[in-house]
Every structure is written in structure tokens, then in C-alpha cells.
Image (spheres, coloured by chain):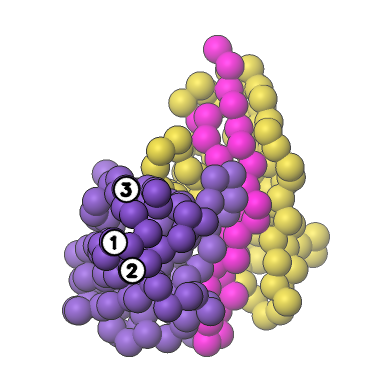
Chain colours: A purple, B yellow
Amino acid sequence: DTEVTQTPKHLVMGMTNKKSLKCEQHMGHRAMYWYKQKAKKPPELMFVYSYEKLSINESVPSRFSPECPNSSLLNLHLHALQPEDSALYLCASSQDRGGVGNNQPQHFGDGTRLSIL
Amino acid sequence: GNSVTQMEGPVTLSEEAFLTINCTYTATGYPSLFWYVQYPGEGLQLLLKATKADDKGSNKGFEATYRKETTSFHLEKGSVQVSDSAVYFCALSSGGSQGNLIFGKGTKLSVKP
């Protein structure tokens, strides 16, 4: 069983809809991540939160809006998505990020499979 | 910049065969190295890790040794099972102010009974 919980597991939405993806972890991790994974590709980093503050935004379009309400929760708000945004969205967490010799593994959830009609 | 190169798949093996998936990396400093596994319809699971040269990570019969002289972290298993069928990702953590994972392209393994 994964210790990072993502909901919903599947989401189908139209291009004009607004929806949110949710991620929760109770491991006391202070870094949380959103990734996008297309079929047969590795995950691509979208956002990094460290101590509830956004620290990395990998040039993600503004139709994706992350939010970290507290140290256990991470949301991804979606609005006006395009068909090419259909993918598996993965959340991950780690004890911390950065630092010399960073050896903190990231723990992933099972993802939300998003389909844009 | 930092990068990870792993062997192209797919790899198809018979049950109980020996598995090697090659992974080499390019990095400045002293990265940590990881193998993740992704079963169909699931997220990524950490399979094993190594944080310094000559470290050997192991889990569920899989092993990988951090070889700084050859900048490699090859994944091996002596006897694969059908349940090992999955996609395997080699990754490095660059440390510093980023702490991001850099993934290889993934290798799909299919094990036939």
C-alpha cells in the first residue's frame, strides 16, 4: 500500500471544467511534488513545494495551479485544460529536498489518470 | 547537465532467467541513485537506492551497485518471476538546491511463464 494517497484515481473533464486533484501524506515529509507522466515516458516534474512554499515551477502553464494548504496536503487545481494535458498525474513526497548529497528518496502515490475531452 | 541513460526496452525474459538492466549517469558532485518500478496502472515504487560510491542497494532479490569509476548503477536479479513484469526507471538525485529526481527513459520488462 502506498503511503501517498491521491484522489480521484480517474478523472474525465471537458476543456471548460474546473477540477482539483488531491494528494495527502502522513509521513511527516516536508517536500511535495507534482509530476506529469505521458504513456511510455518517465515522469516530468511540474512543481515542488518545500515547507509549504512553492520552490520550483517548471514553466508549467497557468491552467495548472498548485496549492499546499498544510504540510500533509497538496492540491492541483485544473482549469481550461487542453486535450494534450491528458496524462497520469503523480504526487510524491520526501523528507526534505536539496542539501549536499541529497539522499532522500521520493515516495509516489498511484496517480490520477486524467482525460480531457 | 545531469542525465541518466538506461537500456532501451522492451526486455522479454522467461521465468527464472537472469536480469540485467543497464543504467549509466552523468552528474556533477555526488548524486544519490535510485531504481523505481512502475507496475501497470500504478504509480512509481522505490525499489532500491544507493547514496555513495560502492554502496549496494538491494530489495526483493534485486541488486544494484553504485560504481563511480564507470558512472553506472546496473539493476540485476538472479531469477525473475512473472510478477516482476513492469517498467523500471533509473534515477538520480542531484542534490544541491534542486533535490530533483532525474529519470532515465524507463525499461519495460516482460517475464513469460
Quick check: is B91 in the magenta stretch? yes
Circle on res. A12: 3
Q: Mark 3, chain letter?
A: A
> Which x, y percent locates residue B7?
74, 45
According to the picture, the residue beneath numbered tag 2 turns out to be A79
Q: Which badge, 2 or 3, is on the more N-terminal residue?
A: 3
Kind of element beneath mark 2: strand
Q: Which badge, 2 or 1, is on the more N-terminal residue?
A: 1
Structural distance between the alpha carbons of marks 2 and 3: 13 Å
Q: Do the residues at pointers 2 and 3 share their chain?
A: yes
Q: Are marks 2 and 1 in contact (CB under 8 Å)?
A: yes
Q: Mark 2, chain letter?
A: A
Q: Could you tell me which residue is drawn at 69 percent across and 61 percent down?
A: B4
Kind of residue sitting beneath label 1: Asn
Q: Residues within 10 Å of mark 1 (few under 14, many from 20)?
A: few
Kind of residue sitting beneath label 3: Val
